[in-house]
């Protein structure tokens, strides 16, 4: 049976990140530049508030249409800050995973939680960000979260960082460096994409 891997992301920055992630994996981490699975798609659910409902409805809607005959592997991609800092998280990811697993065509559920925010992962290629902004090499503050640090770098370059408008920045980053730095986080998903 064919496999379909669907990355569910919560916003535009994450969508840009995972598109670059997918292309980098295909070029550099797969035999012959091809995944061992039939479908590798990215679905932006536009926010964490209705994340669970949108993921489940997307799987339910497409399991017999777009992914007919496939075993489905949803990958839940999210920032962990709302779960760490909020008193009541906006979504119960354990419950979402259990609901997904109850769907006959779902073979497993994977999670990729960006520690705090996706910008913390982008910051792993600080040199790439500085190059994109045409800033000289330098040290990071290290005391701020990735989002605040990137905003400070943009401010140094007399620009404004707008969350969700980072496609051009993401395109310039060294995704292999980020994958290497977060290899433990990505290992299961990379294995999934390379296993027929």
Image (cartoon, rainbow, N blue to C red):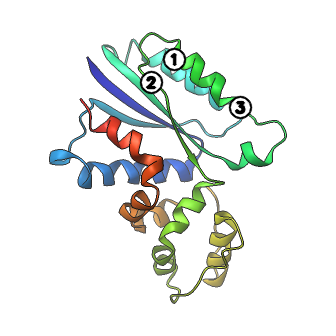
Q: CA distance from mark 1 to mark 2?
A: 6 Å
Whole-percent x, y for residue 60 in the image: 50, 15
Nearer to us: label 1 or label 3: 1
Task: Give the quadrant of residue 181.
Answer: bottom left
State whether residue 73 is above or below residue 148.
Answer: above
Residue located 39% across and 52% down the image:
21
State whether residue 23 is above or below residue 35.
Answer: below
Q: Which residue is mark 2?
A: 108
Q: CA distance from mark 2 to mark 3?
A: 19 Å
Mark 1 and mark 3 lie on one chain; the one further toward the N terminus is 3
Secondary structure under tag 1 reads: helix
Whole-percent x, y for residue 35 in the image: 25, 39
Residue 26 shows up from this direction? yes
Q: Is there a contact, CB below 8 Å, between mark 1 and mark 2?
A: yes
Q: CA distance from mark 1 to mark 3?
A: 17 Å
Residue located 70% across and 29% down the image:
92
Whole-percent x, y for residue 89 in the image: 76, 36
Mark 2 and mark 3 lie on one chain; the one further toward the N terminus is 3
Q: Quadrant of the N terminus?
A: top left
Q: Which residue is mark 1?
A: 101
Mark 1 and mark 2 lie on one chain; the one further toward the N terminus is 1
Q: Which residue is mark 3?
A: 91
Circle 3: is it few (<14), some (14-19), or many (20+) Cα within 10 Å?
Answer: some
Question: On the picture, is 152 further left or further right than 184?
Answer: right
Q: Which mark is residue 133?
A: none
């Amino acid at each position: 049976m064919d496999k379909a891997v669907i990355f569910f992301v919560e916003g535009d920055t994450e969508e840009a990140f995972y598109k670059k992630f997918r292309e980098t994996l295909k070029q550099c981490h797969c035999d012959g530049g091809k995944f061992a699975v039939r479908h590798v798609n990215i679905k932006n659910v536009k926010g964490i508030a209705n994340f669970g409902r949108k993921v489940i409805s997307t799987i339910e809607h497409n399991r017999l249409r777009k992914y007919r005959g496939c075993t489905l592997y949803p990958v839940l991609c999210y920032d962990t800050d709302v779960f760490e800092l909020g008193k009541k998280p906006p979504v119960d990811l354990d419950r979402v995973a259990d609901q997904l697993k109850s769907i006959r065509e779902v073979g497993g559920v994977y999670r990729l939680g960006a520690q705090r925010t996706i910008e913390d992962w982008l910051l792993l290629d600080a040199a790439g960000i500085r190059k994109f902004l045409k800033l000289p090499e330098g040290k990071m503050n290290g005391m701020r979260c990735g989002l605040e640090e990137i905003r400070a770098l943009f401010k140094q370059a007399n620009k404004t960082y707008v969350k969700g408008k980072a496609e051009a920045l993401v395109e310039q980053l060294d995704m292999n460096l980020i994958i290497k730095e977060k290899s433990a986080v990505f290992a299961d998903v990379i294995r999934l994409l390379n296993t027929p």
